[in-house]
C-alpha cells in the first residue's frame, strides 16, 4: 500500500490535478470515481495506472472494474485514505482514480454540427456543455483561446464521459475559421437578430457560445453570419450559459430529427 505523499506517482497525480501545463506535457489526465472510470473503460481507454482504496471492494461495480483492469495488466495500486484524499479533486473521494491518456479524437472532415466555445471560464459549465453537446449530436467542439482547459478536473467530472466520445480541440480563430468553412455560423446573443427557432439548424451548422461574463470577442462576431436569441419572460435578463447551450443544441437536434423523419416518410 502507498502511504507516502512523496511517492513519485502520487506526486504526478497531484500535479496533473493542479496544472494544465503538466497535463499537456504528459498527455494524460485524471478521472475519478466509479462512473467516470467505467466510461473510460467502455471507451477503450487504458490507464497508465490506477489508485484505489480498500473501500472500493464494497462497491460491486468498482470491484469488477478494478479486477478487469488488473487482469488486463494495468498497474493498480492500493493507497491509504490519506493519499487518496490528497490526490483527489473532490471533497468525498469514491475510492478509485485512474491516470488516462488524453483522448485522440478528431472531428469529421465535414461536420454537420460544430460547437465553438469562446472565453468560457467556468470548468463546471464547460463540462456540462460538453455532455449536452454529445447528447444533442454535436460532432466536435472547438475551444477558442481564453476558454478553460477541457481536462480541468471539474470539467472532466461535469462532462460525465463526454471527453471519451466527443472530439474537442483547442484552436485559434484562424484555425476555427478554416474548420467551419462552408458552415452556417450562428452566434448566441441575448439581443440576437433572429429567434433560435426561426433559423435553419439542418445542414452544416456551427454555433458559437460566449463566456459567462465577457461574452464573445470580436473574432467570434466577425465569423458569425447570424446572431440568435432565446426569448425570455419579462424581468429575466439571461440564462446560464450551459442552459442556453442546451436550448440551442436541442433545437438543432429537433430540426434534424424532423427532417430525417420527413425524408424517411417520403421514401
Image (cartoon, helix red, strand yellow):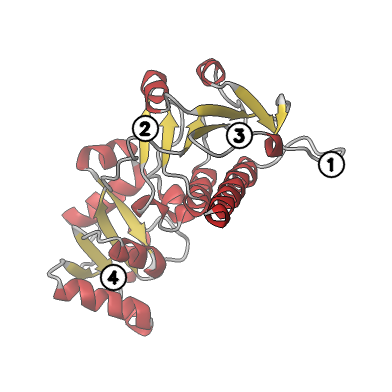
Q: Report x, y in % for residue 48.
A: 18, 57
Q: Are marks 3 and 1 in contact (CB under 8 Å)?
A: no
C-alpha span from label 3 to label 2: 18 Å
Task: Identify the residue at horizontal 70%, vertical 26% (top origin).
Answer: 192
Disc 1 target residue: 233
Q: Are marks 4 and 1 in contact (CB under 8 Å)?
A: no
Task: Identify the residue at horizontal 15%, vertical 66% (top origin).
Answer: 75
**95 to 115, vertically: above or below:** below
C-alpha span from label 4 to label 3: 36 Å
Q: Report x, y in % for residue 12.
A: 23, 50
Q: Pick whichever, 34 or 7, lies toward us.
A: 34
Disc 3 or 1, which lies upstream in sequence? 3
For the residue carrying disc 3, how many other residues have a C-alpha within 10 Å: few (<14), some (14-19), or many (20+)? some
C-alpha span from label 4 to label 2: 32 Å
Q: Pick whichever, 138 or 128, lies toward us.
A: 138
Q: Secondary structure at mark 2?
A: strand
Disc 3 target residue: 212
Disc 3 or 2, which lies upstream in sequence? 2
Horizontal side, residue 229 vs residue 105: left or right: right
Residue 54 seen in this snapshot: no
Disc 4 or 1, which lies upstream in sequence? 4
Image quarter (top left, top right, bottom left or bottom right) of the N terminus:
bottom left
Disc 4 target residue: 52
For the residue carrying disc 4, how many other residues have a C-alpha within 10 Å: few (<14), some (14-19), or many (20+)? many
Q: Mark number for residue 170?
A: 2
**130 to 75, vertically: above or below:** above
Q: Are marks 4 and 2 in contact (CB under 8 Å)?
A: no
Amino acid at each position: 500500500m502507498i502511504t507516502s505523499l512523496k511517492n513519485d506517482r502520487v506526486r504526478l497525480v497531484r500535479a496533473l490535478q493542479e496544472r494544465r501545463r503538466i497535463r499537456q506535457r504528459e498527455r494524460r489526465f485524471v478521472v475519478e470515481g466509479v462512473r467516470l472510470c467505467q466510461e473510460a473503460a467502455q471507451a477503450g481507454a487504458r490507464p497508465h495506472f490506477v489508485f484505489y482504496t480498500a473501500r472500493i471492494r464494497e462497491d460491486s461495480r468498482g470491484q469488477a472494474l478494478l479486477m478487469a483492469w488488473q487482469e488486463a495488466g494495468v498497474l493498480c495500486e492500493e493507497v491509504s485514505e490519506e493519499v487518496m484524499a490528497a490526490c483527489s479533486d473532490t471533497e468525498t473521494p469514491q475510492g478509485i482514480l485512474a491516470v488516462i491518456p488524453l483522448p485522440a479524437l478528431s472531428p469529421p472532415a465535414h461536420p454537420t454540427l460544430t460547437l465553438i466555445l469562446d472565453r468560457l471560464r467556468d470548468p463546471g459549465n464547460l463540462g456540462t456543455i460538453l455532455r449536452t453537446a454529445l447528447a444533442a449530436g454535436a460532432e466536435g467542439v472547438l475551444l477558442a483561446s481564453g476558454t478553460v482547459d477541457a481536462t480541468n478536473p471539474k470539467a472532466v467530472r461535469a462532462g460525465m464521459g463526454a471527453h471519451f466520445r466527443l472530439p474537442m480541440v483547442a484552436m485559434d480563430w484562424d484555425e476555427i475559421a478554416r474548420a467551419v468553412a462552408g458552415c452556417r455560423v450562428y452566434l448566441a446573443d441575448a439581443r440576437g437578430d433572429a429567434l433560435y427557432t426561426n433559423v435553419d439548424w439542418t445542414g452544416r451548422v456551427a454555433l458559437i457560445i460566449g463566456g459567462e461574463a465577457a461574452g464573445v470577442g470580436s473574432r467570434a462576431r466577425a465569423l458569425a453570419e447570424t446572431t440568435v436569441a432565446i426569448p425570455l419572460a419579462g424581468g429575466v435578463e439571461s440564462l446560464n450559459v450551459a442552459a442556453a447551450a442546451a436550448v440551442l443544441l436541442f433545437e438543432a437536434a429537433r430540426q434534424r430529427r424532423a427532417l430525417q423523419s420527413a425524408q424517411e416518410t417520403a421514401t
